[in-house]
Image (cartoon, helix red, strand yellow):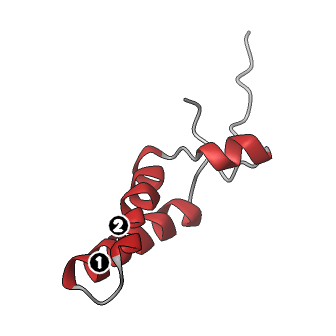
Amino acid sequence: MKKNVGGIDRVLRIVVGLILMALAATGHIGSWGWLGALVLATGIFSFCGAYTLLGLNTCPIKPEEKVS
């Protein structure tokens, strides 16, 4: 798996995932809130399958190393 989630996108996914799971655990939202686990996982592993299908990448581009 090549990383395709980076920076602010990654932090937001982790925060939103935790919030959704907490709301589901406390009964404030329905069981669909447990989808926050998927959002959390995409943030932790820096990989989103939907991004791959759509050709998106929010990771910063690494400069190519020069070989002497």
Classify 10 Å Cα crowding around label 2: few (below 14), some (14-19), many (20 and above). Answer: some
Task: Give 33 or 1, whichever is nearer the viewer.
Answer: 33
Q: Is residue 18 visible?
A: yes
- Judge from the rendering whether residue 3 lies leftward or rightward of residue 61; answer left or right: left
- Residue at 34 percent across and 73 percent down: it is 31
**What is the residue that sits farthest to the top in this orientation?**
68
Q: Which residue is mark 1?
A: 24
The numbered disc on residue 34 is: 2
- In the rendered view, tell whether residue 26 sits above or below residue 31: below
Task: Give 62 or 42, whichever is nearer the viewer.
Answer: 42
- Judge from the rendering whether residue 37 lies leftward or rightward of residue 51; answer left or right: left
Q: Are marks 1 and 2 in contact (CB under 8 Å)?
A: yes
Callout 2 secondary element:
helix
- For the C terminus, the image quarter is top right
Which corner quadrant of the image does residue 62 belong to? Answer: top right
Q: Amino acid at mark 2?
A: Trp
Task: Give 45 or 63, whichever is nearer the viewer.
Answer: 45
